[in-house]
């Protein structure tokens, strides 16, 4: 029977070199999970069979968590960039390619050794997902999806994240997708607009929270005219009746969607293409609040000072009563002027709240989806333009039972991750082409 090597998913380069040095078989089996692994009958044989027939650099499969099906997803080129990609606990590597990848390692990481190995291996061969349940393992992290979502911005993980960023950046350079800190400058004031800013609030069935959001937006103090645009996507729970209260406010506009498919992305498109949309479109989710009456002003000040095409602020995680919840303030310190847009391909989001230069949004448009639409647009903008950052807390993000990502089942998590990985893959290919076309 093939020897199985057990290591943590965050391990050193030294540990990976030792694995390569000791590997004697055609394939190397690595397990990153806890004790308690059990094979389905002939599971290893099936994994070896697929590895041999596909000549893949690495194969991995679905598994059970103590009897409960726990499928994983196919690994796209964009998925490789995620250091938290779930391959399951077991991966079978082709030893020849593993050794070749290890021989080229030129950094000594304390945590990113295995991630660096996979990035290098992805340039040598395919990663094949076997959509069959081949083993049982114990689930270590049983937190809800909403809690896991913020691990990469937890300050306690800062040293780990810096190493992951370094490894990812080296990979992007190797494949021709790395972007230097050179930016196009948007002609922010070239066109005329009815107002300087529009707060956009897409909503559907938010009767409990929509009034709070609208009041938060209408209470802003600015040195320029702005308006608040709510896009209601066929609410049936009384949300529409709440919104009718604001019809008499000249700064309030309500867009009532037809019954075709819109999702969050389509609701944003309806707002930004409306003739009353301002020069800058600012995000406010229908269950959240701005942290104070100066948020809109801070956004526009940042656009004015940094001459950027998008601005991202910081926010605080709270409960419904605005009591702070762990991990507290999310400021995305992993974003830097020099490397933020490269590191954005690795992490799962860029932060909030977000503000956009409307003419650029009208050219790009949001994908008409319910999840990942903001990430897709941010990656596209960052390919060419500077994204400004505001480190002050501008936004209270309320976690409650109706949050879209509060406690998702594994199938929904997989669907969301597959879509974001696809966005990463498309952007990766676009950046490689962008660099090739602009290298002279």
Image: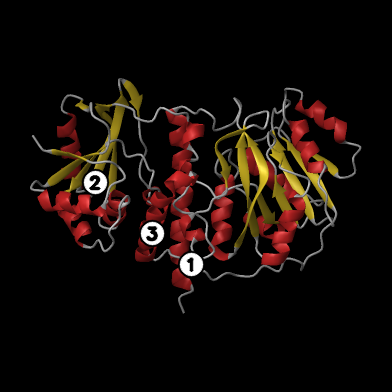
Q: Which residue is rendered at x = 91% and y = 37% of the image?
A: 248
Residues at discs 2 and 3 in contact (Cβ within 8 Å): no
In-front residue for pair 325/232: 325
Residues at discs 3 and 1 in contact (Cβ within 8 Å): no
Q: How far apart are marks 2 and 1 (CA)?
A: 30 Å
Which of marks 1 and 3 precedes in the sequence? 3
Q: Name the residue under label 2.
A: 58
Q: Where is residue 140 in the image (x, y as percent from the top left)?
A: 34, 30
Is residue 101 something one can see in this rendering? yes
Q: Name the residue under label 1.
A: 434
Q: Quadrant of the N terminus?
A: top left
Q: How is the image coloured?
A: secondary structure
Q: Quadrant of residue 27?
A: top left
Q: In which quarter of the image is residue 2?
A: top left
In-front residue for pair 403/202: 403
Q: How many labels does the image show?
A: 3
Neighbour tally class for label 1: few under 14, some 14-19, many 20 plus, Cα within 10 Å: some
Q: Where is residue 13 in the image (x, y as percent from the top left)?
A: 25, 54
Q: Where is residue 303 in the image (x, y as percent from the top left)?
A: 70, 61
Label 2 element class: strand
Q: Which residue is rendered at x = 86% and y = 45% of the image?
A: 251
């Amino acid at each position: 029977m093939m020897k199985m090597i057990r290591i943590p998913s965050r391990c050193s380069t030294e540990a990976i070199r030792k694995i390569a040095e000791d590997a004697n078989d055609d394939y190397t089996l690595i397990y990153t999970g806890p004790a308690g692994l059990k094979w389905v009958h002939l599971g290893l044989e099936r994994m070896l069979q697929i590895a041999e027939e596909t000549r893949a650099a690495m194969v991995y499969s679905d598994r059970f968590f103590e009897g409960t099906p726990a499928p994983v997803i196919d690994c796209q080129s964009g998925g490789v960039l995620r250091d938290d990609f779930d391959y399951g606990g077991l991966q079978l590597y082709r030893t020849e390619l593993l050794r070749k990848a290890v021989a080229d390692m030129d950094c000594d990481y304390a945590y990113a050794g295995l991630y660096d190995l996979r990035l290098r291996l992805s340039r040598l061969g395919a990663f094949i997902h076997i959509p069959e349940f081949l083993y049982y393992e114990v689930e270590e992290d049983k937190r809800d999806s909403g809690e896991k979502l913020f691990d990469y911005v937890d300050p306690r993980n800062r040293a780990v994240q810096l190493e992951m960023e370094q490894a990812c950046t080296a990979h992007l350079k190797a494949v021709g997708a790395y972007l230097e800190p050179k930016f196009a400058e948007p002609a922010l004031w070239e066109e005329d607009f009815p107002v300087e800013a529009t707060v956009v609030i897409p909503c559907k069935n938010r009767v409990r929270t929509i009034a709070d959001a609208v009041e938060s937006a209408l209470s802003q103090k600015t040195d320029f005219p702005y308006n608040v645009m709510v896009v209601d996507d066929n609410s049936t729970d009384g949300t529409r009746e709440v919104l009718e209260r604001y019809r008499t406010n000249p700064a309030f506009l309500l867009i009532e969607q037809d019954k075709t498919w819109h999702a969050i992305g389509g609701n944003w498109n309806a707002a930004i293409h409306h003739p009353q949309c301002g020069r800058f479109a600012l995000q406010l989710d229908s269950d959240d609040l701005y942290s104070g009456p100066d948020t809109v002003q801070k956004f526009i000040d940042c656009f004015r000072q940094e001459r950027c095409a998008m601005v991202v602020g910081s926010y605080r995680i709270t409960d419904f009563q605005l009591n702070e919840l762990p991990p507290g303030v999310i400021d995305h310190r992993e974003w830097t002027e020099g490397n933020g847009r490269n590191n954005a391909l690795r992490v799962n989001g860029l932060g909030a709240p977000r503000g956009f230069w409307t003419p650029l949004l009208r050219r790009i448009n949001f994908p008409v989806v319910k999840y990942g639409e903001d990430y897709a647009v941010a990656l596209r903008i960052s390919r060419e333009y500077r994204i400004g950052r505001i480190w002050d807390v501008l936004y209270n993000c309320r976690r409650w039972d109706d949050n879209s990502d509060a406690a998702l089942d594994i199938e929904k998590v997989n669907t969301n991750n597959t879509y974001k990985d696809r966005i990463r893959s498309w952007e990766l290919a676009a950046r490689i082409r962008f660099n090739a076309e602009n290298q002279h």
